Amino acid sequence: MTRSYCLSYLTLELSPPETITLAARSGYQSAGVRLMPALPGGQAFPLWKNAAMLRETERAIADTGVSIHDIEIACIDGETRVDHWVPMLETAGRLKARTVIAAGLDKDEGRLTDTFAALCEAARPFGLSINLEFTPWAPLNSAAAALRVVTAAEQPNGEVLIDTIHVARSATTLDDLRGIPASRLSYLQICDCPARPAESVEELLFTARQERLLPGEGGADLAGIVGALPADLVVSVEIPSHRRIADMGHAAWAELCLAESRRAMADLDAKRQP
């Protein structure tokens, strides 16, 4: 089977034009960009406020043929309203992105579901889906919880995002993954992590945000995770490593991440149970 590969924003943490350019040089078919921060004061590139960079991004897409797959990030925290995300949705639509990632940070699941549903409705006119991501340190901390919200929201463009590190470090089971309807999945994020459980939230966050491992370097059950998901999902390569980027540079790291992800996925797909 032929997989399509996306260079995730978090792997390099560069501007949209830089990410697209390096994605093209390395052989990725698409790229992810961050237009709103994941943390207060965190890095992001709100292109609707930067006309020059928006034009540069559009030129990079046209010149390279690399499309925008995913846009980050709508942090559903119980306070932020959908109007806040509309400029990001409009820009995502202009860039012909495939999806926008949402983080489930609201402790009130009912309110989280309502906000997610409203976000999906706001995204639909732009041809966007909304991928709800769970993380083990957040209120929405498992695939089962994410599916529960997406199902209750009853929106046709609502999807569940699977990141292999979050599966490995949460209470998510392979049966939970098998229970997600294929219509609620469009891509997965691949990386590896140490087999040893994190001893603190700080260690959990450090690994997830700064020092993930290449597929096969760690102890995540990648064969089980990939085998439990549909075979046609786009693969987003999300492998941040500040240490190795400092050693080898952004371009070489992007190339190595793609090469190792392709190698691993080819092996994992060949082992899939019929």
Image: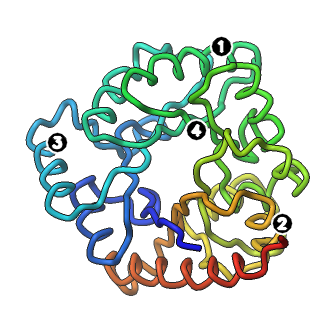
* Residue at the spot of label 1: 114
Q: CA distance from mark 3 to mark 4?
A: 23 Å
Asked if the residues shown at circle 1 and circle 2 are in contact, with their CB atoms under 8 angstroms apart, the answer is no
Q: Position of residue 3 (x, y in %)?
A: 53, 69
In this rendering, the label closer to the viewer, 3 or 2 = 3
Q: Position of residue 48 (x, y in %)?
A: 21, 31
- Point 39% across, 21% down: residue: 125
Judging from the image, what secondary structure is the residue with disc 2 in? Answer: loop
In this rendering, the label closer to the viewer, 2 or 4 = 4
Sooner in the amino-acid sequence: mark 3 or mark 2: 3
* Residue at the spot of label 4: 131
Depicted 258 relative to depicted 132: above or below: below
Q: CA distance from mark 3 to mark 2?
A: 41 Å
Q: Amino acid at mark 2?
A: Pro
Q: Amino acid at mark 4?
A: Asn
Q: Quadrant of residue 36?
A: top left
Q: Position of residue 133 (x, y in %)?
A: 64, 42
Sooner in the amino-acid sequence: mark 1 or mark 3: 3
Asked if the residues shown at circle 2 and circle 4 are in contact, with their CB atoms under 8 angstroms apart, the answer is no
Figure quadrant of the N terminus: bottom right
Please tell me the numbered disc located at residue 54: 3
Depicted 189 relative to depicted 196: above or below: above
Depicted 4 relative to depicted 94: above or below: below
Sooner in the amino-acid sequence: mark 3 or mark 4: 3
Judging from the image, what secondary structure is the residue with disc 4 in? Answer: strand
In this rendering, the label closer to the viewer, 1 or 2 = 1
> Is residue 133 left or right of 219 when viewed as pictured?
left
Please tell me the numbered disc located at residue 19: none
Q: Quadrant of residue 134?
A: top right
Please tell me the numbered disc located at residue 197: 2
> Is residue 38 left or right of 184 when viewed as pictured?
left
